[in-house]
Image (cartoon, rainbow, N blue to C red):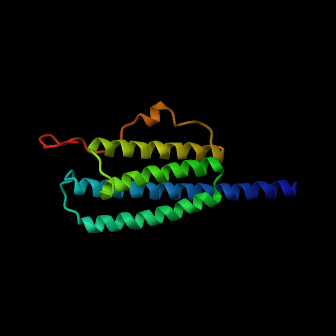
Amino acid sequence: MERTKLRQMLLTRWDEKKLETYSEYVTYVRASIHAAVLLYETTEGLRDEPHDVRDLRLNLTDLGITQSSAFERVMLLAEDSVVVAAHGVQEAVAAVVWQARGVVGGTLEDWRKRNADAFAAINRFHQEVRNDLGVSGNFAGEVHTARGLLLPGTRTGAADDS
């Protein structure tokens, strides 16, 4: 009986650590995406308020380092399906960041697709985490993923909206 209690206590402790790690990772992923959006909107003239592009780039770099560190912790604690999903998140977020930085070119439509892909990857990660932690239910269906992203619309009167 004592062994069973100890085993359950250890499983609960690891589940708590996993939840903390997974939540922290998603927080940094979303912060990186937000910073990329701010940089992209500023450099593309989609945001009216003035921002120093150099500061935006440095912030995005710092968040990328923190996100990578959080990803490493996921890899240490997660089961294979969660790690695979986290790799998908890393790749999708990198594509968003690369376009925001101008490393890869693309239209506004490409930008929107990259962001949609990133959030679809986050949703897959969430679902794998829920499975890993034994959380019942499923939110990765059409109702959740069909919700739109909060990305800027095309500007009317702009010479080239794409």
Is residue 135 positioned above or below 49 on the image? above
Choose between 119 and 8: the one closer to the eye: 119
Residue lying at the far right of the rendered structure: 1
Is residue 127 positioned above or below 33 on the image? above
Quadrant of residue 146 within the rendered picture:
top left
Residue at horizontal 68 percent and vertical 58 percent from the top: 14
Q: Quadrant of the N terminus?
A: bottom right
Q: Is residue 60 left or right of residue 27?
A: left
Residue at horizontal 45 percent and vertical 55 percent from the top: 29
- The x, y position of residue 130, in whole percent, is 60, 44
Residue at horizontal 35 percent and vertical 66 percent from the top: 59
Q: Quadrant of the C terminus?
A: top left
Number of labels in the image equals 0
Residue lying at the far front of the rendered structure: 104
- The x, y position of residue 88, in whole percent, is 51, 48
Choose between 44 and 48: the one closer to the eye: 44
Q: Is residue 89 left or right of residue 39?
A: right
- The x, y position of residue 12, in whole percent, is 70, 55
Quadrant of residue 126 within the rendered picture:
top right
